[in-house]
Image: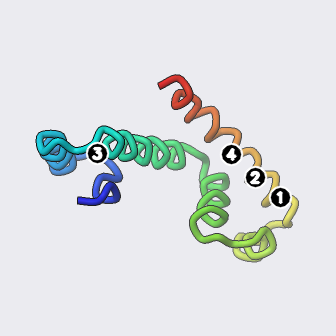
Amino acid sequence: MSDDAILIIDDDADLRDLVRLLAEGTNVDVVEAAERKRDVRQAILSLSPAYREVIVLRHFAALSYEQMSEAIGVPTKTVKSRLHTARQQLAGELAGWMHR
């Protein structure tokens, strides 16, 4: 099973999969990667819709600032400002990784 198979552990089936992987001797790095993916997803979901939107468009849809501006109907400067603030908020949410 690839580490993409455990993106989120939010129900019993996902938890069973994780327990099975651990019982099979799955590499700890895979489990940690799955935990990080879950944490990043939760951090993104905790953003306000306007900030989440620019993160998704930039980092998952790979749109340029200009394309993002057109897609959401705001000036490019606003896109850049929202993206900067969203990244700062994500950094704050995920700062605990540095201490693990």
How crowded is the residue under tag 3: few (<14 C-alpha within 10 Å), some, or many (20+)?
some
Tell me which residue sits at (56%, 28%) in the image.
98
Q: In which quarter of the view is residue 93 placed?
A: top right
Q: Which mark is first along the chain, 3 or 2?
A: 3
Q: Distance between the residues labelled 2 and 1?
A: 6 Å
Disc 1 element: helix
Labels 2 and 3 touching (C-beta < 8 A): no
Q: Distance between the residues labelled 4 and 2?
A: 9 Å
> In x, y percent, where is residue 65?
78, 68
Reply above or below: 36 against 72: above
How crowded is the residue under tag 1: few (<14 C-alpha within 10 Å), some, or many (20+)?
few
Query: Which is more foreground, mark 2 or mark 3?
Result: 3
Inspect the image, locate mark 2, and give the three-letter code of the amino acid beneath it. Answer: Arg
Q: In which quarter of the view is residue 73 placed?
A: bottom right
Disc 4 element: helix
Q: Count the marks.
A: 4
Label at residue 82: 2
Label at residue 42: none
Residue at which label 3 appears? 9
Residue at which label 4 appears? 87
Q: Which mark is first along the chain, 1 or 4?
A: 1
Label at residue 78: 1
Tell me which residue sits at (16%, 50%) in the image.
13
Q: In which quarter of the view is residue 88 placed?
A: top right
